[in-house]
Image (tube, grey):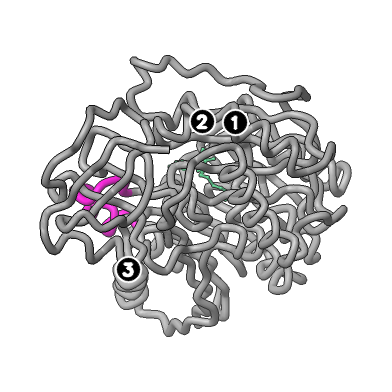
Amino acid sequence: MSYPKVILKPGKEQSLQRFHPWVFSGAIKRIDGTPSEGETVEVLSANMDFLGIGHYHSGSISVRILSFKNETIDDNFWGQKLQDALNLRQSLRLYPNPNTTIFRLVHGEGDNLPGLIVDIYGETAVIQCHSVGMYLHKETIAQQIINLFGGRIKGVYDKSSGTLPMREKYNPTDGFIAGTGNLSGIYEEYGNKFWVSWSEGQKTGFFIDQRENRRLLQEYSKGLKVLNTFGYTGGFSVFAMRGDASQVITVDSSEKAIALSTQNIEENFGNTHKHKAIAIDTFEYLRTTNETFDLIILDPPAFAKHHDALRNALQAYKRLNLAAIRKLNPGGILFTFSCSQVVSRVDFRNAVFSASAISGREVSILHQLTQPADHPINIYHPEGEYLKGLVLRVK
Ligand code: SAH
């Protein structure tokens, strides 16, 4: 199969030869043919040596590489890539696993499928396209997912309406694109039950990336008074309760999230006086409460989505962490996170360092946390490492 050809400037082939999966527009010398948005193209060096095949896009990232081999992008190609992704999850014991029916099957560049996210909730796969190229192939991908699971996945739901670039042009609407199923359901993480709605929830419905960190939190929780801020579905709260915390308070600014966290606690522990959920801004709560805690979780949304917002974001992380440290009892534990892609591990640690220094408390790092193995980071694409966490002990 012959694809339109993107020819790079001399010297610009090096990053592709090191398997970096993006071609920036500035690296291109010329294009033979007129590829449309999302079309599959072949990338060649200035000497016309083959470098890779990928999806063409307008914008600063011109090509997202699908393969560094000279192959045809057909049903078989998608089937193989998805099989490879599933093999990894099987080796991680995430599938099949009756105690954990929520996991990520495809994590974009980390699974060598740039622009594609696929999350599994029991019998439903939810896909999110972050590139037009993937969006144009979504039906093929969905069918290959159904084939891959041999009947165990009954429907593939497309939730690209919030993530697809050029939405005015493609006008994406969410819905099932292969098979069928419900819009929500109850699924498990380490045996804990969570109500997940892919049609209404944030991301694909659940923050799957915190699974291993919640599990670690469970180990710390026995007998502690726990504050879970930015709690959303109450993921950390459920694990704290499972770990036998003496009291758990969930805080989120969204009434809907607070209702969801209450529902999830009830689903797992029935009606319990140990859990309280409050709809309030975290900064305001920390400023106004008279209570102190043995363990606090800070898992805010990304404070910086772009580089120009970095300085303000770091200030916000510093303020938030300082406010939390001040509410910790002596010997207290802080689980603190940043999911901003543009905030590096070092930046984040410096912000937490500043907060610690201002607090005047002795602080040590117990764990350095990241995203779980079903959110792999392509070593040639370090931008994929977005989740950073620290567990601190505050004297
Ligand atoms: N920790 C959660 C995920 C957090 S997502 C989990 O494990 O699933 C971020 C959450 O922060 C969202 O639910 C959003 O409603 C909430 N949020 C955003 N800004 C907030 C603020 N200023 N105060 C409190 N909650 C906020």
Res. 185 image quadrant: top right
Q: Does the magenta stretch mainly form a helix, a strand or a loop?
A: helix
Label 3 lies in ligand 1 vicinity (Cβ under 8 Å): no
* Front-most of residues 353 and 185: 185
Tell me if residue 248 comes above or below residue 277 in the rendering: below
> Which residue in the protein does label 2 denote?
137
Q: Residue shown at 66%/62% (left/top)?
A: 88
Three-letter residue code for mark 1: Thr
Q: Residue shown at 18%/44% (left/top)?
A: 25
Do residues under tags 1 and 2 come within 8 Å of each other at their CB atoms?
Answer: yes
> Which residue in the protein does label 3 denote?
18
Q: Position of residue 165 (x, y in %)?
A: 35, 29
Three-letter residue code for mark 2: His
Task: Inspect the magenta stretch and tell me whether residue 96 lies in it.
Answer: no
Three-letter residue code for mark 3: Arg
Residue span colored magenta: 304-317
Tell me if residue 207 comes above or below residue 211 in the rendering: above
Earlier-in-chain disc, 2 versus 3:
3
* Front-most of residues 133 and 347: 133
Marker disc for residue 140: 1
Q: How crowded is the residue under tag 3: few (<14 C-alpha within 10 Å), some, or many (20+)?
A: few
Q: Position of residue 280 (x, y in %)?
A: 51, 38
Question: Is residue 227 found left or right of 239 in the rendered image?
Answer: left
Res. 330 image quadrant: bottom right
Earlier-in-chain disc, 3 versus 1:
3
Q: In what element is the residue under mark 3?
A: loop
Residue 288 visible in the picture: no
Q: Position of residue 376 (x, y in %)?
A: 53, 62
Q: In what element is the residue under mark 2?
A: loop
